Amino acid sequence: MLEGTAEPDLWFMPDLVQCAGRVVARSGNGDLFFVGRSLDSMFDLLSGALADLTAPNLVARAPFSFQRQAGQPRRSKWTADQQAAARRLLGSIGITPRALARRSRPATFVDVVDAGGTFADLFALLDEWIVESREPWEVIRKKLRFVGITVRRATSPKTWRWQQHASWTRRLPARAVVNVSLDPEVWSYFGDYQTKLTRSFRPDRWLAAEEGPRRDERTRQALAEAVAVVSYGRGSEGRRALARAIDGEPALAQPWLRSLVRQLNSAA
């Protein structure tokens, strides 16, 4: 599918690497689950950079969204079949109440954030499942983390922060919900304009049969871009750049992150 494609212009790479380094540093040593499709490029970058390291953190996709069909409100009640399908999908990536209560690392969900609606829906889905399962909430709450990728803006004491207006975030430990800012143009490209390689997986499609990959020119070029991002992450330049992006983060005081930085620099 790459035959005849143009060399991708990875104009966003410096901002992507800087943001990805901060996501890793603020993950709480968690396994990273990228919600939806908006951050496919960060998934690709970290999949390449963290490959072959000793005991690497898992980098996985949670490939569904909660976008409603036109005219439907957010957080409308899912049908029993939709709920079962969502739980099967979460289970396929190791996210179940039982698994959460027993995992050694946190499960850290990452997504672009405007008002935080997708994270709220995901938390609601997990919360109902946990209640039904009777698994210990006081244990599970320490295994959940959320990292929101927000648009970089000038900050002030009056800056609006989505997590301060979401009641569900107060049920988690302090620092379990954090943000990393990203250049507005890059944020918009990933969230609004980048051609994706997979379909949107909103609730009305949770029960639909899987579709094969498209083969139009835009999709082939998007595949070339994704391959180039993975290759950059696997290379010495990309790994050194990711290590530099982590430098200065407070979490470097923790052994797990210092070890990761050493491995990135030595692998380079």
Image (cartoon, helix red, strand yellow):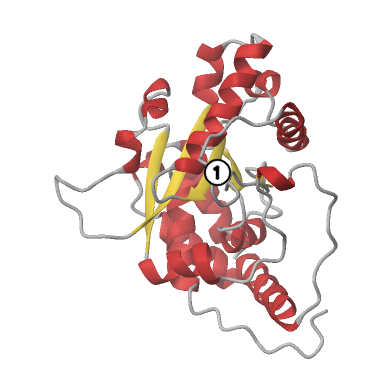
Identify which residue, 153 or 74, lies in the foreground.
74
Q: Secondary structure at mark 1?
A: loop
Q: Residue at x 21, y 59 (%)?
A: 154
Tell me if 25 is positioned left or right of 108 in this view.
left
x and y percent of residue 105 in the render? Answer: 59, 30
Tell me if 240 is positioned left or right of 224 in this view.
left
Location of residue 4 by image quarter: bottom right
Residue at the limit of the structure toward the left, as seen here:
157
Whether 235 is drawn above or below 2: the answer is above
Q: Residue at x 54, y 13 (%)?
A: 137
Whether 261 is drawn above or below 88: the answer is below
x and y percent of residue 221 in the render? Answer: 69, 80
Identify which residue, 84 or 221, lies in the foreground.
84
Whether 218 is drawn above or below 89: the answer is below
Location of residue 54 by image quarter: top right
Q: Residue at x 71, y 66 (%)?
A: 197
Q: Which residue is mark 1?
A: 72
Label 1 crowd (10 A; few <14 / some 14-19 / many >=20): few
